[in-house]
Image (cartoon, rainbow, N blue to C red):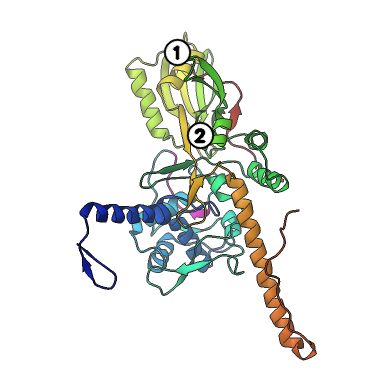
């Protein structure tokens, strides 16, 4: 039994009703919660936080405001959900170990790579980062569409007029219903160069893109192995595969990441394995605890001491080797048994138009091209709005002198006319 919008009661098979209801729920999760929009790289909750901060005047040059105020404003105006989940999202936007280019400039304790929790929202303060200013710089120029908020009293943007391809430079992850996305972050300079080349040559191949974009660029650094030995499903033999090119060509793939490791003589006759960078999303405290457990269980040998010497200048985990031990052997054991070597599996999926249509980020056309097309359309809309405003002003001032009113063109012609990396890309894979 089901009730129509008009109040009519009708019989319906339960399996049909469950199928229809679940499809509605799935699309709601996909569009309104889990997948980012390819145009600004944001999910609705991120977009609402940044738009609220923009309305509050929290530019990168303004004073900080309490996070409790930002959370309260966002929740009251645009996002009527739990305040703790909203605050967790705001915190992540400010973490330089979570985002390659943080969109929020935080002041106070916003957590750490050790897994320490942030301070309560009544203590921390925030404002938009400079890069977020660029994401919203043209919001007042009638360049994006707006929709009613949850109660119809206010209007909120469907997407932000992002001047930067945020989806590719910061990446995104999320689990929807029947699908998931996991997009790695990239270097800003490389992505901007790729966008410029795509404008000049929209038919660029994945190989040509890989000449510009050397691979993901994770906020915590590390070394990415470009090549990997994979088993041929036909011959059964191992073949050397360009993992990064495969990931960009198919939208799916896996890359191996290692922490940055060096050998140092910490005292006369004693060598140490020193870790200065970690793979993405690895908890430093958990890693050190795992190392200690493995040494205690003798899975890792020749280690005399493990200590964390990290400070404000950077990360430094010292694994001291016994006098007669081999630091190279210890390093290989650490790679094999701990998260000092991990893999990042990508599934590049995003909303194409914000209306439930989704596609692979590196499909046909690739995300950089889709962003470029959306950006060009936005610029055209901005110019049309300015022409219309100038035309109205001109007619108001000189209407008596005009024989015929001015008309606007139906559309503008096509407007077609370069940060250091943190992650290194290794050309040779050796994970033994």
Q: Which residues are magenta?
A: 103-113
Q: Residue 11 at x, y = what percent?
A: 20, 62
The residue shown at (67%, 42%) is 203
Q: Residue 220 at x, y = what percent?
A: 52, 37
Asked whether residue 47 is drawn in magenta, I would say no
Mark identifier at residue 270: none
- How would you classify the magenta stretch by its main secondary structure? loop
Mark 1 closeness class: few <14, some 14–19, many ≥20 residues within 10 Å: some
Observer-nearest of 250 and 268: 250
Kindly indicate the quadrant of the structure image that contains residue 123.
bottom left
- The answer to whether residue 246 is above or below residue 58 is above
User: Label 2: which residue?
Assistant: 315
Q: In this rendering, would 393 be left or right of 222?
A: right
Q: CA distance from mark 2 to mark 1?
A: 23 Å
**Which circle's residue, 2 or 1, is located before the other in the chain?**
2
The residue shown at (42%, 16%) is 303
- Secondary structure beneath dot 1 equals loop
Mark 2 closeness class: few <14, some 14–19, many ≥20 residues within 10 Å: some
Mark identifier at residue 322: 1
Q: Where the N terminus falls, by quadrant?
A: bottom left
């Amino acid at each position: 039994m089901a009730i129509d919008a008009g109040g009519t009661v009708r019989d319906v098979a339960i399996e049909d009703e469950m199928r229809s209801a679940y499809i509605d729920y799935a699309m709601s999760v996909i569009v309104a919660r889990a997948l980012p929009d390819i145009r600004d790289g944001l999910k609705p909750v991120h977009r609402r936080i940044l738009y609220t901060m923009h309305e509050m005047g929290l530019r990168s040059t303004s004073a900080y405001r309490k996070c409790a105020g930002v959370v309260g404003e966002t929740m009251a105006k645009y996002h009527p959900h739990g305040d703790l989940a909203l605050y967790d999202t705001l915190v992540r936007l400010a973490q330089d170990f979570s985002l390659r280019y943080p969109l929020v400039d935080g002041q106070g304790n916003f957590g750490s790579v050790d897994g320490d929790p942030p301070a309560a929202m009544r203590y921390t303060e925030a404002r938009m980062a400079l890069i977020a200013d660029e994401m919203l710089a043209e919001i007042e120029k009638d360049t994006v569409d707006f929709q009613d908020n949850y109660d119809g009293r206010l209007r909120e943007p469907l997407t932000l007029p992002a001047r930067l391809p945020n989806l590719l430079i910061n990446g995104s992850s999320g689990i929807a219903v029947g699908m998931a996305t996991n997009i790695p972050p990239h270097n800003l300079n490389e992505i901007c160069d790729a966008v410029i080349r795509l404008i000049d040559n929209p038919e660029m191949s994945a190989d040509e893109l890989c000449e510009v974009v050397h691979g993901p660029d994770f906020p915590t650094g590390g070394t990415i192995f470009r090549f990997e030995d994979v088993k041929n499903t036909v011959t059964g033999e191992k073949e050397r595969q360009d993992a990064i090119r495969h990931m960009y060509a198919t939208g799916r793939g896996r890359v191996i990441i290692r922490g940055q490791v060096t050998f140092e003589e910490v005292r006369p006759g004693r060598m140490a394995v020193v870790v200065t960078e970690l793979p993405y999303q690895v908890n430093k405290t958990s890693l050190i605890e795992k190392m200690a457990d493995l040494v205690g269980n003798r899975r890792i040998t020749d280690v005399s001491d493990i200590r964390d010497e990290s400070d404000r200048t950077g990360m430094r985990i010292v694994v001291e080797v016994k006098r007669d031990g081999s630091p190279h052997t210890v390093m290989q054991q650490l790679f094999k048994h701990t998260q000092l070597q991990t893999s990042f599996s990508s599934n590049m999926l995003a909303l194409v138009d914000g209306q439930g249509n989704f596609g692979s980020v590196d499909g046909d056309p690739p995300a950089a091209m889709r962003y470029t097309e959306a950006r060009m359309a936005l610029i055209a809309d901005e110019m049309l709005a300015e022409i219309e405003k100038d035309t109205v002003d001109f007619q108001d001032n000189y209407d008596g002198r005009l024989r015929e009113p001015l008309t606007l063109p139906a559309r503008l012609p096509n407007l077609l006319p370069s940060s250091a990396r943190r992650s290194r890309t290794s050309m040779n894979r050796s994970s033994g």
